[in-house]
Structures are given as structure tokens and as C-alpha cells.
Amino acid sequence: MKNEEKDISHKEDLLCFHCGDICKDKSINKEEKIFCCQSCKLVYEILQENNLCKYYDIDNNPGISPSIRSDIKYEYLDEETTKRQLLDFSDGKISTATFSIPQMHCSSCIWLLESFYKLDPGVTHSQVNFPEKKFIFRFLEEKTSLRKIAELLDSIGYEPMINLDATERKSRELYSKKLYYKIGVAGFCFGNIMLLSFPEYLGIDKAADPMFYQLFGYLNLILSLPVFLYSSSEYYISAYKGLKSKVINLDFILFLGILVLFVRSVVEIITQSAAGYMDSMSGLVFFLLIGKVFQSKTYESMSFERTYKSYFPLSITILKNVTQSTVPLAKLRIGDRMIIRSGEIIPADSILFKGDGNIDYSFVTGESMSTQKVMGEIIYAGGRQIGSAIELEVLKDVSQSYLTQLWNSDTFTKTDESRLQTFSNAISKYFTIAILILAFGAAAYWMSTSINMALNVFTAVLIVSCPCALALAIPFTYGNVMRIFGRNKFYIKNTFVIEKLSNATSVVFDKTGTITQNKKSLITFEGRELNEFELSLVKSLSRQSTHPLSRKIFDFLERYETKEVTDYFEYVGKGVAGEIEGLRIKMGSEEYVTNKDSDIHYNHENSSSRVYLSINDVILGYFNVSNSYRAGLAEVVQKLEKNYSLHLLSGDNEGERGFLQSYFKDPLQMFFKQTPDNKLKYIKALQNEGENVLMIGDGLNDAGALKQSDIGISISEDVSNFSPACDGILNSEEFPSLPNIIKFSKDSFKIIIFSFAASFVYNLLALGIAVDGLLKPIVAAILMPVSSISVVVFCVVSTNYFAKRRKFK
Amino acid sequence: MSVIVVLIGVSVFVAVGFLIAFLWAVKSGQYDDRYTPSVRMLFDDEKKKEEDPK
């Protein structure tokens, strides 16, 4: 299947056999296969034991490096209430359930997951739905359990994402099925009506065989009923909803057009005056529904509506009368004593009761340094405990905690409807009024001649002016743009996002994780190789300092122990020194550590900095800390600067203000130490000044701002992973193409305006004929599909052309 | 000419049959996943592989 790729991978032999990551050395290997880490090797061993090595034959390096976490995570799956929610079916012996596994990415994954019965004999059947990243399985209750399956999946790298509120998904599935039914019915009727209208198209004299003429007419009438009553029902509902909230939307004009077409055709068929326009009506509905499907492409595997609930654990261990038990998060009460283990997120504001708190709030604030907490201190929800397990007493309900309160603000309760004042809605209002005036005017003009003629002209105007071009241009243009974005790793929630994106006036960036990279592998040590003890000394010292470089080194050395530092001193702008277990350690600039003059302190060119290290005055070498800003940031800012006002909101401290100033010229628009609430308010303030705000963020700390902004885009290293509620998810690799994305959305808006103008001219010409009462059924029957198809072709071809010009795939 | 009436009856009958087939296909979930089956059918059966000396 992928022979070419195989050849390449043989040349670069330092790729992990399991996951394809670059291996640092060949130390982790088995049977001439190299692995990047122990966990990858472990997965290989599991698969090998179970005779599943074919996994590696289907695709190259298909594996996923599993995360190293304790199996405690899935304990809650043993609980009855949780189980009942997750099982699709169970008779006590055999159960079926569905997990969502965002990590699956290739045909090897499908094969392995569908061979799951080999790994766990309790699983009798398993099936994968790849586009939705779903894993559906049936298992024997007595041989295995949900928890065991989840743990096993996790151990081979496929971490299941368990979401308890799956109700939303089901309604969407139902909707898309309904749309297919409607298209099927409309297509069937359209085709048959066309067939039965052939004699009419060919101009066969109706006087020759009136029986057939009548028969065909009534058959057409019967065939058009399902289209009129069923397939187009959505437009009636939407038009009614619009009228109820006093908005004339595009669907209202479509409704008017369909209604007039149908009524006039019925009258013509019954009175046998003419053949009617049933073919045009069903054709119009058919094309419109196809446009709907084209537009409604969704990225099912991604969630754009995540709230804090998706980040928090589903259940929590509590301590009651010395016995531990797990309860679902919703049942956590004030006063409960909960146990938080290393790596777990604290779900509610609470007081530290026992143990050493070392809380990492990076998730909430973007601040990457963890904070120490001692007994009796209040710990806010959203922090992640690092180190040993701690005991906490719950102070506030989950929904009332400091972090989660953000979701109680108006921004999250109000629906999107009010902001959906789209171009099409704005224009349809004037369009409708103009058409109605024109129709009545023409009718009044002909009234003096004959009432029949007046009615004829009145309906003809409404039929011809039916803005099907506009109704088709929007879904096909935006639907195609959405697809092109998707190919370029920018995934949007729906097509409205494109229009809103083209209207943006200012761009707000978050710092941590958005314009900086999260990867920690950007640090290397040059010099003598350091042993574990020395590295833990370095970590202990760097922990004391808040300088960005110290913090990066601290983060880099995550897995080493920290020791107590005495005699600590920080020389601002130079370095730090301290004594650990009798050893004198110095870290800092070359000048400071080596006492030599040097001109390389900070090198903007290769954007990396060096931190020298000495222990007992022996210089061991330096850490090369490369700049963690995203590649292409300078160009992105440069390109956007011309047309947009740029802002930076960071939860971090001011450590890098100086450096950022070289990017963001205006210091007034750069804010540090922003809380999630501050960010939300800042966006609101901008909007009050009339700006259309595009917010680009990543973490939970940006959730409020992303939601409040007109368009919130979240940047993610792994699109299937964490991302808060937003309108679009951009893969971090594609960050440099951000200016092009905005430009392209503008292009697509222009395409719509152009096709609208073109269809307006076309309508005007047709109107001219109609007002004169010259429009023959055959002309209308031909013009209708031709204009529809030409609009669709124009939109798709021109978006593809612009995509090429903007260098999209 | 009246045979046309019969022919139209037959043609509509056949067309309705296809419409029902389509609706049934959608309902039974055949359009839910349009990708995975295309990959699944390429996997070899284990037993067959053993028999095959290649």
C-alpha cells in the first residue's frame, strides 16, 4: 500500500519502530528494532506476545506512544451509575459499549482495534468507525469489564476519551439521516417529474392527446406533493422562526418562491391551462438540499463545545470513615474529604488537609511554574497535583469554584443566535421588500388589461426572482472553503465561521501555548554528560528562580528529584547560585559562570540562549535553550499588522516582555498576568469599541475569551486533544498560514458577492421577460437548472482557484 | 398508445422500489461510516494466510 514510504524509513533508521518518533539513541531496542521510549517498547512486546505484529506491516510506524499514567484513572468505570451511562446495551452477561478514541489515525489502528479480541478474550466483537473515531465493542461481563478494556486500550496507546453526555451526538446523527431521507425523496420526485414533463419540453401538441396531457399533469401533481410537504419542510420552519423573531431571512424568500411555484402549478394543472412548474420546484428543493449536505460537513471526531467538565475527572476518590470510595463528580459535596493523586486535576476549591501540595496551574493561567501549598491553604480548582497524593477538604461546589464560575457568566449562557446577523440575512430583507414591491407593481400595471394576466405576471416575478443563486452560492462556496481548510489542518465548527473570519478587525493572541510551543525537547546540554544526581541539582536550583530560562530548564527536567537549596542568590540578568548538599552550583550567562567575556548572551539570529553550568567552580558545559516561539511568528505578526490591530494577553508574568516587544510594536496592547476573567473582559471592551475580535488561544484559561470573541480559534499540537469551546481548531504546524486563512476567507466572501451580483443580473433579465408575460414554461424549465448548476460550478471552481493562489493544498 | 399508461405505472413502481431501498439503506446505517469498510476489506484473514505459502 505504501511501498515508497517504506523505502524512506529504511534509510532513516533512527525512527522508533512503534511510533515513528525520532529516537535519541539506540539504547532501547529489541530484536534489532529501535524504540524511542520504554513505553513504546512495552506496547511492541504486548503485541508480539499476542501475535499481533501484523500491525506493523499495514502502515509504517503506526503506533502511538502511550502516556505514562497510573491505572487509577479508570477506577470509576467499575461504578454502577457510570457503567449504566456508558453501556449501549446490557443483559447482565453480554454488554456493548462505544468508546471514542481520538488517537486512531491509520489502517493499522483499525486492524489492531478490530483484532482486540486477541488481546482480551472477554471481548467477543469489536468494530471501528474511523471517521468518527469510535470503537464499538461487545464483551462478556464475567470475563472482562469496561475498566479492564479501557486500561488495556490505554496501555497500547489508544487512550479512550470518555464523555458522559452523549445526548447531543445522537440528535445530530438523527438530523443528518433526516436530511438524507429528504434528498432521496426530492431526487426521486424531481427525476420522475422531469421524465413525465418530456412531452411538454418537446412541445407536443396538447390538443392531440388530451388524455395523456391530463394524466401527466396529475401524476406530476402527486409526485410533487412529497417534495412540497416533506422535503422542503425545513425551509418553512426556518422562515416561520425568522418571522417570529421579526427577521426576514433567506429561507423566507425561498419559502415564498416554493409556495408560489407550487400554488400556480396546481392551478395550471387543475384548470389544464398549462403544465405547471413542478419540475422547477422539485429541482430547486433538490439542489438546495444538496447544498445543505455540502455545507454540513462536520468534523465528528472533534468537539468544539468543551467546557471545564471535559477537563475534570469524571469521578473522584473520597475518604469517609477511613474507607476510600469513588463517587461521580456531580455527587461531590462541600465538606467531603477527597484524595488527589499525582497528575490529577483538582475539581473544586478546597483546603489542603494532608500532604505536600505542588500545584501546577499552567492549565488555568498559562503560568508554567508550579506552586507549593502547605496544609491549611486554599487550593483553587483546575490545578494539577504533581508529586505525592494529597488529601483535600471540599470548600465549594464544583460549579461554584473559582475557575468554573467563568462558565456561569453571560457569555456561556447566551446562545449564538443573536450574533448570526450574517450577510445573507441582511441582504434578504431588502431583497424581499424589493421583490414584493416589484411583483405588486407589475400586477397593478397589468390589472387594467386583465386579472388573469396580472396574476400570471405576479407569480412569474416571484418565481423568477427566487434567489436560488444566492441560496446555492453560500453553501457551496463556504462548504468548499471548509473542506479546503480541513485539508490544511484548520477545522471549523460551521460555515458561519468563514464569514465572521472575513469580518475580523482585530486579532488577540494568547501567549503560552499559542505563540509559544509546548514541546519541551528544545533544550539540549552541550558539554560533559550529566548524571542523574547532577541533573537533580540543576533542577533544584532552577526551581528557585522565576526567570523564564530557569523555568524552562526546570520543566525540561521534569522527572528528576528536587533537593533543598541553601544559600540561594539570584544576580539579576546574570544567573543564580546556591548550595545543595555541600556542592556550590552556579547557572547563568557565560560571563557570570565562566568569568570570561563573551558576546553571545542572547542570539536573536538562531533564537536560542545558553545557560552555563558549574559545580564547585568546574564548568561542565551549557544548556542550549532554543526559543520556544512558534516558527513563523514574526511573519504572521508582520502580515497581520498592516490590516489589523494586534493584542497580546498572557497569563504569564512579564519575563519576556522585552523580547515580545520586538514582535508586537505597540506596548499598550500587551498585557501580562491576565486571569481568564480579565481576558474575557478585555475582549468585551474591544467589542464595545466596535471591533470584530478574532481570538487565538489554546488552553482552558482562554476559554472565556474564545467564547466571547466573534471568532475564537484554538491552536493545538494534536487536534484530537484538549481544546476549549471555540469556532475553529488550527493545527499548530499550520500557524504560519494564519494570515492566508484570513485572506482566503475574505476571497470567499468576494466570490459570494460576485455570484450574487451575477445572479441579480440574471434575475433582472428574466424578470424583464416575465413582467412582459413572455416567459414560456420550457424556457423557465431550462433556465432554472442551468442557472443553479452554473452558480454551483462557478463557486466551486473559483474557490479552488483562490485556494491555489493562497497556496493551500 | 394506452400501453404508455401501463409502462408509466411499471416505471414508477420500479423507481419507488429504488427509493425505498435507498431510505432503508440510510436507516440501517449504511451511510454512517463510508470509510472504514473500504479499509477493512483489505485485511487478510489469518487462516488464509497460513495456507498460502507465499
Image: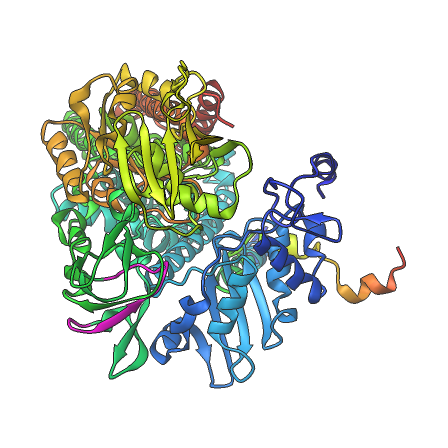
Against A92, residue A245 (above or below) is: above
Residue A254: tell me if it is visible. Answer: no
Q: For the N terminus of chain A, give its image quadrant.
A: top right
- Of A298 and B18, nearer the camera is A298
Asked if the magenta segment contains residue A342, the reply would be: yes
Against A384, residue A707 (above or below) is: above
Q: Residue at x 27, y 77 (%)?
A: A319
Q: In this view, does A51 lie to the left or right of A722?
A: right
Against A753, residue A424 (above or below) is: below
Residue A391: tell me if it is visible. Answer: yes
- Of B15 and B29, nearer the camera is B29
Q: Is residue A732 left or right of residue A688?
A: right
Q: Residue at x 32, y 69 (%)?
A: A315
Residue A34, given in percent of the width and then of the height, sits at: 68, 47
Using the rendered view, name the quadrant where residue A503 is placed.
top left
- Of A590 and A124, nearer the camera is A590
Q: Which residue is drawn at 18% across and 34% down?
A: A451
- Of A105 and A273, nearer the camera is A105
Using the rendered view, name the quadrant where residue A781 is placed.
top left
Residue A807, given in percent of the width and then of the height, sits at: 48, 21
Q: What stretch is highlighted in magenta?
A: A333-347
Q: In the rendered picture of this protein, how many numbered marks are placed on residues?
A: 0
Against A236, residue A705 (above or below) is: above
Q: In this view, does A311 lie to the left or right of A173?
A: left
Residue A453, given in percent of the width and then of the height, sits at: 23, 31
Chief SS of the magenta region: loop
Q: Is residue A192 left or right of residue A52?
A: left
Asked if the magenta segment contains residue A699, the reply would be: no
Residue A92, given in percent of the width and then of the height, sits at: 47, 86
